[in-house]
Image (tube, rainbow, N blue to C red):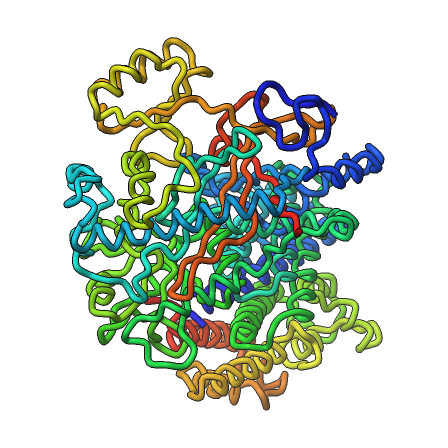
Amino acid sequence: MSAGGSNFDEMFDGGGQTRPAYDEYCRWYNEQPGEFLKRKNREADDSFRRTGITFNVYGEDAAEERLIPFDMVPRIITANEWRKVSRGIEQRVRALNSFLYDLYHRQEIVRAGRLPERLLQSNDAWLANMVGFTPPGGIYTHIVGIDLVRTGPDEFFVLEDNARTPSGVSYMLENRETMMGMFPDLFSRIAVESVSNYPRRLARSLAACVPPAFTGGKPTVAVLTPGIYNSAYFEHAFLADQMGAELVEGSDLRVVGGRVQMRTTLGYKPIDVLYRRVDDDYLDPLTFNPDSALGVPGIMDVYRAGGITIANAPGTGVADDKAIYSFMPDIVEFYTGEKPLLPNVQTWRCADKDSLAYVLDNLAELVVKEVHGSGGYGMLIGPTSSKREIEAFRAKLIARPENYIAQPTLALSTCPIYTRAGLAPRHLDLRPFVLVSPEGIDITPGGLTRVALKKGSLVVNSSQGGGTKDTWVLKD
Amino acid sequence: MLGRTANSLFWMFRYLERAENTARLLEAALRMALTRDLVTAEAEWRSVIATLGLQKAYEALHDGYDGVSVWNFILRGPSNPGNVRVMFGAVRSNARMARINISGDVWEAVNENWMKLDALLARPIGQMAVGEVLGAIRRAGTQVHGAFDGSMLRDEGYHFSRAGTFIERADSTARILDMKYFLLLPSLSYVGSSLDTGQWEQVLRSVAGARVYSWLNAGQIEARGIVEFVVLDDRFPRSLAFCRSALRDNLAALARMHGVEGHCNALMRDADTRISHLTVDEIFDQGLHEFLVDFLARNASIARAIAQDYRFHA
C-alpha cells in the first residue's frame, strides 16, 4: 500500500498512516491472500455482466452496452463526517425548493436584487407555463443528487446540484449488493449504514405527492423511460421493479378524460404520480419539442389541471445550471436565513467582463464548463489540456462568454482503487441522493462514489471512462 | 399489466421457441447428412431452408445446398434478418422491455445465454463447432424454461408467455410435418412399408420425438403412426394436439383473470372442435396438407386475436 500525493487521501494521512475510518478495513485487507482478491476482482465484473447492470453510450452503436467499472475498495465516511455533510445537503435542498417556488411565483429574490433577472430570461430550462402553478404538495424536486468533492479533512464542496433527473442510484444499490455478496465477512466486522431501502423510501415519497385528481386507495405510480436504448434504461427498470411501479414509455400513455392513462391489457388506467426519466423538452410534444415521440401529448394541461403529479416537476432545470450555481450561497442564505453549511467551489461567471478577462488569462490553470452542460462533455480542464486544445477553447469562450463558467482546478481527494499492482490512489467525488416530500427531506447515507480510473485524471463521469465504488457511512 | 409488456412476453417466448426449434431442425438435418449419401444430404439441406421459408434469400447468395452454407445462413447470416443470432437478440431485448414482469432468475438465464450465444454466433461456424453451437441453443431454451417454471408468478404475464410458446411450437411442428409430407408424397402409397423410413424418422427427430416414438411403438416406423403421434397424441409436448390444449388452458386463464372472454377464446373453441375428435384416417381422407394449411391459418389468427384482445399495440 502506498499513500497518495499532495492532495487529501481518504485512506492514508500524510505520513502514510491509515485514517481511523479505514482502520478495520485495512486490517481485513491485509489479512486477505493476494490470489483471493484477484479472483474476487474478476468475479465482480462477471456478476455485473450477468445481471445486466449496463449503460448505453451515446454516439456509439445503439446496441452497445457497457459496464461501469466497479472498484471493490469501498469509500468510507465516518458517522461524524456524514452528520455534517447531510446537514449541509438538507439545507441546500430546502433552499432549492423554496427558490423554485419563488421563481415561478413572486420572484422575491429578483425583487430583492439578489439575483439578476437576465439569468432567468436567458435560461433555456425556464418554463413559462409553470408560472403561477404550484405542484402537488408544493414539491418541485422530489429527487435530487448533490455532487460533492472533498479537498481536506473537513473540506467538502458542492460541485453541482442535479435537480432534473439525477441518475446513478441503481449503482449505489447494486454496488452494495455486490460487495455484500463478495465479502460477507467484511460486513460482519464493520457496521455500515444500510442503503437498501432507498426504493421503498422513493415509493413512499412519491406516493405522498398525489395530485388533486387522486381518487383514493393505493396511488398508481409509474416510471416513464425513453426506452431500452436510453443510457440509463437499466436504472429505470430497476427502480420500477423495486418500487412495484409500472415502467411506461410515451407510446403506452394517452390523455383520456382529463387524466394521463396507461394502456393495460384491461384498457386504459389513470396514473397518479409519474416519475419521469425523460427531459422537459420531450415531455409533451404539444407544449415543447413537437417531434418528440418520448412523451405524452397534452400531459402539461393535465398537470396544470391537477390530474397528475410529475416528478421532478417540469422547469426545475432552471435551478441547476452552472450560472445559477454561482449564486447558490446567496440563494441558500436568502431562503433559509442561514449561512450555507456546504460551500460552493469558487466560480467565475464568464458573462462578467472582469471574470472573463481573468479566465482568459488563466485558462491553463482553470476548469471551464458549459453553463447547461453535463456528463463531462464540452468542458476544458486547463492543466491536463494541450496548448492547441486551450486555444480552440479560448475561441469558443470569446464567441459566447455567457455560455461558460470557470472554476479553479481543485485538489480533489483520492482514495485507493484495486489494481493488479496493488492499491493505487485515484481522484473521486460523491453524489448523495436526496428525496423530498411533504413529509420531509430524506437523505440515504452515502450515495454514489464516482472514481477516475486513470492515474491523475480528474474526470469521474461514467461516460468518460470513470468507475464507481461502494460508499460506506459507518455507524456510530 | 401494460399491453406493450404483454406483447414483449409473448414475443420473447415465441423467439425463444423459434430459436430452439430451428436448432432441432438443423440437428436432425446434420445427423441425416452424416449418415446418408451426398444427394440425400443436399435434398435435406434444401428442405431445411424451405421449411423455414428462406429459399429466395438463400439462393440469392449460394448456388448449391451444403451444410456449412446452410447452417451459417440460418444461424448467423447477415443477409438473413431472421437468423438465430437476431432471434436471440430479440429474446433478450423483449426480456429487457418486460424486465419488471419477469423474475430475476429468468432474466439472468436469458442474459447469460445471450452473452454465450452472441459470442458463439459472432464467427463462421465450421463442421467441428456446429454440434456444440446447436446444443448451446437448445440448452438456452431449456434453462430459460426451467427458470421460468420455478420462479415466475402465475399471473397474466405467465400466461402470455406460455401462449407465445405454444403458438410458436404448434406453428413449427405443423410446418415441419407439411414440408416432409410434401417431399414424401410419393412414398405414401407404400404406407406401412419400410421404403423410406429414414425420411419419416427425420420428421420425428426434428420435433425431438424419435426416441419416445420408437419406445412407444417398439421400434416400428410407419407414416400413419408418425402422423398420429405428431398431430394427435396429447401426451407428446410438441404435438399439435398438446400445443392446442396448452394454448386453450392459457387463454382460458387469461379470460378468467380479466373477467371477460375475448375474440381469441372464441377462435380457440372453434379451432378446438375441429381437432379434438379427429382420427388419423379422417386426416388422411381430408388430406394432410389441407389439414395442416387450415391448422396454420387458425393458429395465426388466434395469435392476432390475442394481440388485439389484450391491447398489445396502441
- x and y percentages locating residue A62 in the rendered image: 44, 41
Is residue A54 or residue B234 the one in the foreground? A54
Residue extending furthest toward the top: A387
Is residue A172 or residue B196 the one in the foreground? A172
- x and y percentages locating residue A202 in the rendered image: 47, 61
In the picture shown, does residue A370 fall above or below A214?
Answer: above
> Picture quarter containing residue B281?
bottom right
Identify the residue shown where x is 33% and y is 50%: A336
> Picture quarter containing residue B130?
top right
Q: Is residue B304 visible?
A: yes
Q: Quadrant of the N terminus of chain A?
A: top right
In the picture shown, does residue B256 fall above or below B243?
Answer: below
- x and y percentages locating residue A174 in the rendered image: 60, 51
Q: Is residue B65 visible?
A: no
Q: Is residue A42 left or right of residue A133?
A: right
In the picture shown, does residue A180 fall above or below A355?
Answer: below
Identify the residue shown where x is 68% and y is 43%: A46
Identify the residue shown where x is 44% and y is 35%: A60
Is residue A134 or residue B285 the one in the foreground? A134
Is residue B92 or residue B296 the one in the foreground? B92
Q: Is residue A182 left or right of residue B254?
A: right
In the picture shown, does residue B115 fall above or below B288?
Answer: above
